[in-house]
Each structure stands twice: as structure tokens, then as C-alpha cells.
Amino acid sequence: MLEEQDDLEGALKSYQQTLEVIGRLATSDPSNTVWQRDLSVTYSRVGDVLLAQGDPVGAKESWERCLGVRRRLAVSDPSNTGWQRDLSFSLTKMAQVNNQNGDRGQALRFAEESLNIDERLAALDPTNATWQKDVKISRALVAHLRK
């Protein structure tokens, strides 16, 4: 809510406090996937706020942590479509930030990995409009990065 009110400082403080708590919980029980996912969401939100505050380096570091957690979750259960989509989302975000920072090669690798996940999910359920939209977004990003 603080983010929506443009209180980025307050939002960051709140997310950092959440990160401390959920970080301790996630560390105390790495097998608790709910805590692990909550940790990844919090890292992502911290990154979003840091970017909005003009700290792209801090944002990228937080998103990399998010990606690490999401990658572990996705690998631990490839059948969990929610975790697969979370991973794809993080890969897309990393592709975008690497492209903004001039690392087009790394950006393309992230984007292609995201596209592979999105295509796999979309093939599982061709009626899932969200997954179909994810494929279109990922294809557009890959095409842009290949130019």
C-alpha cells in the first residue's frame, strides 16, 4: 500500500523488515516452500522499490536473490506451474535489467530461458490466457534482443 501512495521510503523500510523476518524463517527451514516463495516475493518487491528510487544496482542484486530462490523452487518441483511461472517472471525481469545495463548477451540468455518455460506452460493448457500472453511477451522480448 505504501508503494501505491508513492511512499517509497516507507515501502522499502516495510519490505526490509519483512525480509528480515521471512529471511530468518526461510533459513531456519529451507524445506518450507511457502516461506521460500514469500522470501522470493519480498526480494522482488525490494528490487522494484530500489529501482523506483534510482538504485538499479541494488535492485538488480535483490532481483538476483529472488531469481536464486525461484530457481531452487522450480527445480525442486518441475510440475508446480506456479513456481515455473514465478521463475519465468524473474528471468524476464533479469533480461530487462541486463538489457538496460548494456549486457544484451546475458539479457538474451535470460529471455530465451523464460520463453522456454512460458512455451512449456502454454502447451500444458492452451486455454490459459495468462500463459498464452506470457508466451507473446517473451517472444517479443527475445525478438527485440536478437535484433
Image (cartoon, rainbow, N blue to C red):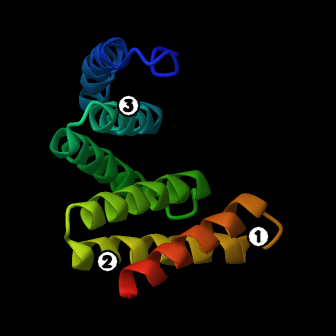
Q: Quadrant of residue 121?
A: bottom right
The kind of residue on which mark 2 rests is Arg
Q: Nearer the viewer, mark 2 or mark 1?
A: 2
Q: Is residue 40 above or below residue 24?
A: below
Q: Mark 3 and mark 1 in contact? Answer it, CB < 8 Å.
A: no
Name the element at disc 1. loop
Which residue corresponds to the image point at 54% horizontal and 76% vertical from the top-left?
140
The kind of residue on which mark 1 rests is Asp
Q: Nearer the viewer, residue 139 or 30?
A: 139
Between marks 3 and 2, how big is the CA–CA gap?
Answer: 25 Å
Quarter of the image with the C terminus is bottom left
> Which residue is tagged 2?
109
Q: Is residue 77 above or below residue 143?
A: above
- Neighbor class of circle 1 (other Cα within 10 Å; few <14, some 14-19, many 20+) is few
Q: Earlier in the sequence, mark 3 or mark 2?
A: 3
Which residue corresponds to the image point at 60% horizontal and 77% vertical from the top-left?
119
Between marks 3 and 1, how big is the CA–CA gap?
Answer: 29 Å
Which residue corresponds to the image point at 42% horizontal and 36% vertical from the top-left?
41
Q: Nearer the viewer, residue 5 or 29?
A: 5
Q: Position of residue 128 (x, y in %)?
A: 78, 63
- Neighbor class of circle 2 (other Cα within 10 Å; few <14, some 14-19, many 20+) is some
Q: Position of residue 52 (x, y in %)?
A: 33, 34
Name the element at disc 3. helix
Residue 125: mark in rendering: 1
Q: Position of residue 125 (x, y in %)?
A: 76, 70
Residue 42: mark in rendering: 3
Which residue corresponds to the image point at 38% horizontal and 87% vertical from the top-left?
146
Q: Quadrant of residue 94?
A: bottom left
Name the element at disc 2. helix
